[in-house]
Amino acid sequence: MTTFLFLFHSTVGVVRMRKALQAAGVAFEVKDIPRQLRSGCGLCILLEGTEADARDWIVPEQTAALYQQDGEAWRCLATFPPAG
């Protein structure tokens, strides 16, 4: 399994994704953002699976970026604009 990291424009996105993952019974972690990455709210969500699985969990207008773990580093797969 591969680890994916979701960054959000605000904590609203973290809360929405957390609730959706809990309702679906998907294992995940909410953590502080790694130092090498930056985002508006300071929190990220980590989950394991395939890239297709990870992309299914993108919250439109809330998710800022999706990263894939590559050894000790994070590789950006996509970035997304904020609402508005």
Image (cartoon, grey):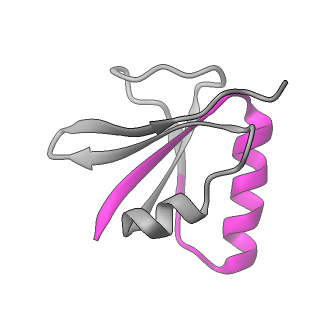
Answer left or right for 46 relative to 20. Answer: left
74 left or right, relative to 51: left
Q: Nearer the viewer, residue 5 or 33?
A: 5
Q: Is residue 26 above or below residue 34?
A: below
Taking the spot 75% from the left edge, 75% from the top edge, the residue there is 23
Figure quadrant of the C terminus: top right
Question: Residue 32: image x %, image y %?
Answer: 51, 33
Q: Is residue 38 above or below residue 78?
A: above
The x and y percentages for residue 17 are 70, 55
**Farthest-out residue, right:** 84
Return the residue nearer the eye: 46 or 53. Answer: 53
Looking at the rendered image, the quarter that the N terminus falls into is bottom left
| Nearer-the-camera pick, 70 or 33 | 70
Query: At 40% across and 23% down in the image, what residue appears?
Result: 37
Q: Residue at x 19, y 46 (%)?
A: 70
Q: Position of residue 62 (x, y in %)?
A: 72, 38
- Residue at the image point whose x is 17% and y is 39% from the top: 72
Q: Is residue 5 magenta?
A: yes
Segment tinted magenta in the rendering: 1-29
Picture mark count: 0
In the rendering, at what x and y percent does residue 30 appear? 57, 48
Q: Is residue 80 left or right of residue 83?
A: left
In this view, 17 is above or below 78: below
Q: Quadrant of residue 57?
A: bottom right
Q: From this viewpoint, which residue is outermost toward the bottom? A: 25
Residue 52 lies within the magenta run: no
